[in-house]
Amino acid sequence: MTQPFVELDREAWAGLASEGDAAAPLPLTAEEFHALRSLGDEVDLDEVREIYLPLSRLLNLHVRATAQLHASTKTFLADLPDRTPYVIGIAGSVAVGKSTTARLLRLLLARWSDHPDVALVTTDGFLLPNAELERRGLLQRKGFPESYDRRALVQFLSDVKSGEPEVVAPVYSHLSYDIVPADHIVLRMPDIVLVEGLNVLQPARPRTDAASGLAVSDFFDFSIYVDAATADVRRWYVERFLRLRDTAFREPMSYFHRYAELDHDAAVAQATQLWDTINGPNLEQNIRPTRGRATLVLHKDAYHAVEWIRLRKL
C-alpha cells in the first residue's frame, strides 16, 4: 500500500549531504564540537556529517522555497509585509536527544548565507512556575501538557509569525528546576526560530464552546520528531540521571541536590521510579502519539545513532 511518506536508511540519507549544492556548510569546528560534548550531548562527527548536514540542506531548501512563495504572493497582492521567521518545531521524549538535535541544527543552519540568524527557544520556559504547579497539584506531572502555560506559548508563536519586531520568551533554569522571573530571551525577527519541547506537536485542546482552538504546531513551517524505542530511552534517562548525580546535582543550589549523595543502586532506583511514574507515561500517553504529525522523523538505534529517516511527502 502506498504511504504518505518516504523512508530512507542511514546510508541513503547520508548520500544527500551535498549533492548539487556547493554552498553546503562545513561540519562543526573542533571548538563547536567540544562545546556540544561538554553539555553531555551524545553526538560524534560521523553523526553530524551523515545525518545533520543532509538535514540542514533539506531545511535550507524549504526555507528558500518559502521565500520564493512569499515573493510570488507579494507580487500577486501588489503589497505584502516582509516575510516572517521560518519556524521549525522539534519534539520527542525526555533523554531522546531532541535538545542535541536543536543545538546542532542551530549551528548548522546559521552557516547558510540565506539564513544566518537562527534562534532557539525551548518550551521549558513556558512551564508554569513550580509554586503554581504545586497549587494546582501538578508538580508530579511536570512536562505533561497541562503543566504548560499553553496560552502564553501560542501567543508567543503568534507574535513571531505575525512579524512583530521584538518578541520575548521566558527562561527556565535546570539548576533551580523553575522559571527565572528576571530573565528572558528577546527575538528580533530572526531568519529561523527553532522551537524545542516535549509536547510541541500536540493537537489543539477541545474548547468548552466547541470552537476550534489553535495548536502550537499550527505555527510551524516544518517539524521534526526524534524517536527511539521506549526501552532505549528509559535506559538513556537512567544513564543521564547517574551522570547528573556526579555533576549538576552536586551544585548546592540544584533542585535535585538531595540526589547527589545517593549510591549507585539507590540512584538507579530513584531514576527508574521517576521514569516509570512521570516520564514514561508522558511519552506513551502524550508525546509518541504526536509522532505522525511531524514532517520528518529521526529514528535512533540503541546507541543513539539515527538509523532511518521518514519524510512526509508534499
Image (cartoon, rainbow, N blue to C red):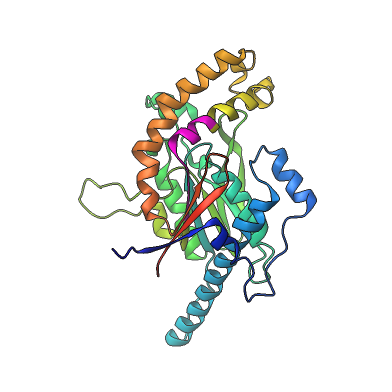
| Residue 181 lies in quadrant | top right
| Residue 310 lies in quadrant | bottom left
Q: Residue furthest right?
A: 31
Quadrant of the frame with the N terminus: bottom left
Residue 65 vs residue 189, the one in the foreground: 65
Could one spot residue 150 in this view of the protein? yes
Magenta extent: 224-235
Q: Residue furthest left?
A: 210
| Residue 135 lies in quadrant | top left
Magenta-colored stretch includes residue 226? yes
Numbered-mark total: 0
Residue 157 vs residue 286, the one in the foreground: 286
Question: Residue 166: horizontal and vertical position, in percent?
Answer: 58, 58
Relative height, residue 189 to residue 205 (above, below): below
Judge left or right: residue 91 versus residue 106: left
Residue 275 vs residue 300, the one in the foreground: 300
Residue drawn at x 49%, y 28% is 130
Residue drawn at x 73%, y 55% is 28
Magenta-colored stretch includes residue 168? no
Relative height, residue 136 to residue 9 (above, below): above
Judge left or right: residue 196 versus residue 186: left
Residue drawn at x 67%, y 62% is 110
Quadrant of the frame with the C terminus: bottom left
Question: Residue 258: horizontal and vertical position, in percent?
Answer: 60, 15
Judge left or right: residue 238 versus residue 132: right
Residue drawn at x 50%, y 73% is 66
Relative height, residue 222 to residue 243 (above, below): below
Question: Residue 13: horizontal and vertical position, in percent?
Answer: 55, 61
Could one spot residue 140 in this view of the protein? no
Question: Residue 185: horizontal and vertical position, in percent?
Answer: 61, 48
